[in-house]
Image (spheres, grey):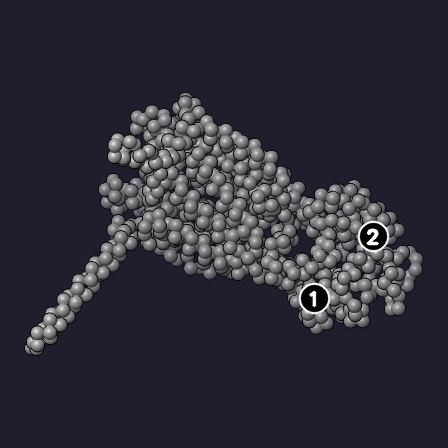
């Protein structure tokens, strides 16, 4: 595409005496000569990667990616060290008496993997010994024939043992049971993602196959493309094992994005091979020349995408590192697979591709190109009018940040169950205060002040549960172990009437923290969904500015060095940035709330993946002007004619993949991400095809003269003038000195 890299090297000259100096490394010849060994190497890599992929650990908890500097992460680390970090759930059983609810509670608590269940009878018997039961709070646990239990598991939310325990609990409660909580949500996400991604990949591969059948000239070419990309995807998934653990968001979208974004590389190579064959070369020589020709386009095109993905690794919220490394690694692996493995497959399948050739289905786009060029200034004015409002609107969106928003959106069973529970018992949001133990009086005062807050449903602390004068050993270890760890820390469970993520929840969290800091100014932490979400929001919104700036700088530098121009990166990036602004402004105009995680990722994906459309168009324009000698208006029309088929193929694939994610996935974060990717690809295609011609014609003079070269020549001439002036001054000074030595006086 760019013509900035050369990979075929001439032979060395002979040494004196006639001995050859040897040959420099010739990559195309090496690939062709070693094609069988390369095939075997990639086959081995695919097998090993397929075996490793199931062992890659998937993380479903966004709080794991918080930096250790924020208070909620510090509190979670402390809680994990002292009390452990067990999974939690909330279970409602419908249409039961108080006695039946007690029986259900006992059966559920006996399930393997369940540590304990907090209910009315916690610490005593609900039906006897009324001295320890506060019946004023019974409607928080039993109401209108429904009982609700707070469940703590032996292991974490994503543990297989916890998942199995939830299955057994569902069998016990049957249709009467409703389940919410992080353990339930993580299990639901894991099951839905695995099932949905299989469906998404199947539909995606089929739709990409259809697009490729329409845009290629052989029925076998799509099979070849998908085979090559399939190999790259499997190797990328397997090599994720070296990262140890990746997020479920990364695992969900990396394969389809890698497939959609890097498909161009194999298309570049096949098109170059076809051109060489039409020139009359035999198969081997045509492939050798095609590799050398396509390497320039493949390497330069992939570099902008790699940079766009890698900048995600600079996020403090380290899910960006997770996703950036996996996506960038996927592009590198696709690049290597196309460069090394695809030539071997072409040699095997070239004959079959010729036999399955068919006439082109796409038109030549000449009339469309002329029509677009005629309205170029209208498009220019329209874009100028909407760009600033779109930029303003995209900065005014409403976002969600936390685990609840990511994994339990509308359409999921967890969301439906949550609505049922909320309808009876209202919302319940658990936070946990970690405080130094030892002063039971202060702890009781703190817990009582929390209990008096109007939005507090209940507060569970050991100082409240334990009557004055009664030793701690009087209560069962299941209660004391939950609230005191024996090494200097107490845990207080606080249930408030709010969602996990909302303005009210943030207000409640801030007030509870302020009260906690009055009693325990040092070494106290508030943890839970709301404090963690607050810290996620504070961290990730700062990350957005950093990532956006770095992606712009990175792509600008890559394009600048590729074209050796300062203007071309500006021309190439303006349409894509405007497309991003419009894409992100649409949710604000429609009054939608987005998952911020998708928003920040898509900005980099859309820039890195679709800036190639603008680069290709610019490169074609320069070729039409310099190589074909066309006048600038005709060059713009010819540029569109050449560029639209490639843009349409690549953009359609990215659009289809995005909208499949949007329509199939029930996970809110994945659906939002897909919607933004699909709409962004459409907008990028439209703006590059309609807006670029006006920019290219307006910037024609500088494009043709290469402003960097002109600037270098200007600096060279300026330096030469200064050198000549300095030399003249030296000569004049020399003459004065000679005159002084001879006793002459200059008149």
Within 10 Å of disc 2 (Cα), the crowding (few <14, some 14-19, many 20+) is some
642 in relation to 83, above or below: above
Please tell me which residue is depicted at 80% across the width and 44% down the height of the picture. 112
Which residue was labeled with disc 2? Answer: 145
Tag 1's secondary structure? loop
Above or below 251: residue 496: below
Vertical arrangement, residue 290 with respect to residue 307, above or below: above
**Residue assigned mark 1:** 524
Mark 1 surroundings: few (<14), some (14-19) or many (≥20) residues within 10 A: some
The foreground one among 675 and 326 is: 326
- Residue 503 pos. (x, y %): 63, 63
SS category of the residue bearing label 2: loop
Structural distance between the alpha carbons of marks 1 and 2: 39 Å
- Reading the chain from its start, which is encountered first: label 1 or label 2? 2
Q: Position of residue 14 (x, y in %)?
A: 27, 34
Q: Quadrant of residue 72?
A: bottom right
Residue 104: which disc? none
Which residue occupies 82% across, 55% down?
Answer: 478
Number of callouts = 2
Residue 264 position in % (x across, y down):
43, 38
């Amino acid at each position: 595409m760019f013509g900035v890299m050369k990979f075929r090297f001439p032979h060395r000259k002979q040494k004196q005496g006639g001995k050859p100096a040897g040959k420099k490394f010739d990559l195309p010849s090496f690939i062709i000569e070693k094609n069988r060994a390369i095939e075997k190497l990639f086959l081995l890599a695919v097998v090993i990667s397929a075996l490793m992929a199931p062992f890659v650990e998937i993380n479903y908890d966004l709080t794991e990616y918080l930096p250790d500097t924020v208070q909620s992460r510090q509190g979670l680390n402390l809680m994990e060290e002292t009390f452990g970090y067990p999974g939690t759930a909330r279970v409602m059983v419908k249409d039961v008496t108080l006695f039946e609810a007690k029986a259900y509670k006992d059966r559920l608590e006996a399930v393997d993997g369940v540590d304990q269940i907090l209910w009315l009878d916690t610490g005593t018997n609900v039906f006897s010994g009324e001295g320890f039961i506060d019946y004023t709070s019974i409607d928080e646990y039993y109401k209108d024939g429904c009982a609700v239990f707070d469940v703590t598991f032996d292991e974490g939310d994503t543990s297989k043992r916890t998942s199995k325990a939830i299955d057994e609990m569902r069998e016990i409660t049957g249709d009467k049971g409703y389940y919410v909580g992080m353990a339930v949500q993580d299990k639901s996400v894991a099951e839905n993602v695995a099932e949905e991604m299989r469906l998404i990949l199947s539909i995606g591969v089929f739709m990409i196959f259809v697009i490729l059948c329409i845009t290629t000239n052989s029925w076998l070419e799509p099979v070849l493309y998908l085979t090559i990309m399939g190999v790259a995807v499997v190797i990328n998934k397997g090599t994720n094992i070296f990262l140890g653990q990746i997020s479920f968001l990364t695992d969900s979208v990396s394969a389809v994005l890698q497939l959609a974004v890097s498909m161009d590389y194999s298309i570049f190579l096949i098109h170059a091979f076809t051109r060489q064959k039409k020139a009359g070369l035999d198969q081997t020589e045509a492939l050798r020349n095609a590799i050398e020709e396509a390497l320039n386009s493949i390497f330069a095109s992939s570099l902008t995408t790699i940079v766009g993905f890698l900048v995600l690794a600079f996020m403090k919220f380290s899910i960006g590192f997770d996703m950036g490394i996996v996506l960038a690694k996927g592009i590198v692996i696709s690049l290597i697979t196309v460069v090394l493995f695809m030539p071997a497959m072409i040699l095997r399948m070239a004959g079959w591709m010729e036999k399955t050739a068919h006439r082109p289905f796409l038109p030549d786009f000449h009339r469309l190109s002329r029509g677009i060029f005629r309205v170029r200034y209208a498009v220019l004015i329209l874009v100028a009018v909407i760009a600033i409002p779109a930029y303003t609107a995209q900065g005014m969106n409403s976002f969600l940040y936390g685990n609840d928003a990511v994994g339990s959106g509308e359409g999921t069973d967890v969301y439906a169950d949550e609505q049922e529970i909320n309808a009876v018992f209202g919302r319940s949001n658990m936070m946990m205060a970690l405080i130094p133990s030892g002063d039971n009086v202060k702890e009781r005062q703190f817990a009582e002040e929390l209990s008096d807050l109007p939005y507090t449903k209940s507060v569970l602390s050991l100082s409240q549960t334990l009557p004055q004068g009664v030793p701690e050993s009087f209560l069962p270890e299941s209660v004391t172990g939950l609230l005191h760890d024996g090494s200097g820390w107490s845990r207080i469970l606080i249930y408030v009437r709010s969602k996990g993520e909302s303005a009210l929840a943030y207000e409640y969290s801030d007030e509870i923290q302020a009260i906690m800091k009055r009693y325990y100014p040092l070494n106290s932490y508030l943890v839970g969904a709301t404090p963690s979400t607050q810290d996620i929001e504070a961290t990730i919104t700062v990350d957005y500015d950093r990532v956006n700036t770095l992606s712009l700088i990175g792509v600008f530098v890559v394009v600048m060095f590729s074209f050796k121009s300062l203007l071309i990166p500006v021309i190439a990036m303006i349409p894509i940035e405007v497309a991003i602004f419009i894409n992100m402004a649409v949710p604000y105009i429609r009054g939608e709330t987005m998952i911020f995680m998708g928003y920040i990722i898509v900005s980099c994906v859309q820039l890195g993946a679709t800036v190639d459309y603008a680069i290709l168009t610019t490169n074609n324009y320069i070729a039409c002007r310099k190589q074909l000698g066309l006048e600038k208006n005709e060059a713009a029309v010819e540029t569109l004619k050449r560029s639209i088929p490639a843009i349409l193929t690549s953009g359609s694939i990215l659009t289809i993949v995005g909208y499949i994610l949007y329509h199939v996935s029930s996970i809110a974060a994945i659906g939002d991400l897909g919607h933004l990717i699909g709409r962004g690809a459409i907008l990028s295609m439209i703006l590059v095809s309609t807006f670029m011609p006006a920019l290219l014609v307006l910037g024609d003079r500088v494009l043709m003269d290469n402003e960097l070269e002109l600037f270098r020549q200007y600096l060279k001439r300026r330096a030469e003038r200064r050198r000549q002036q300095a030399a003249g001054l030296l000569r004049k000074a020399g003459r004065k000195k000679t005159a002084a030595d001879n006793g002459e006086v200059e008149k």
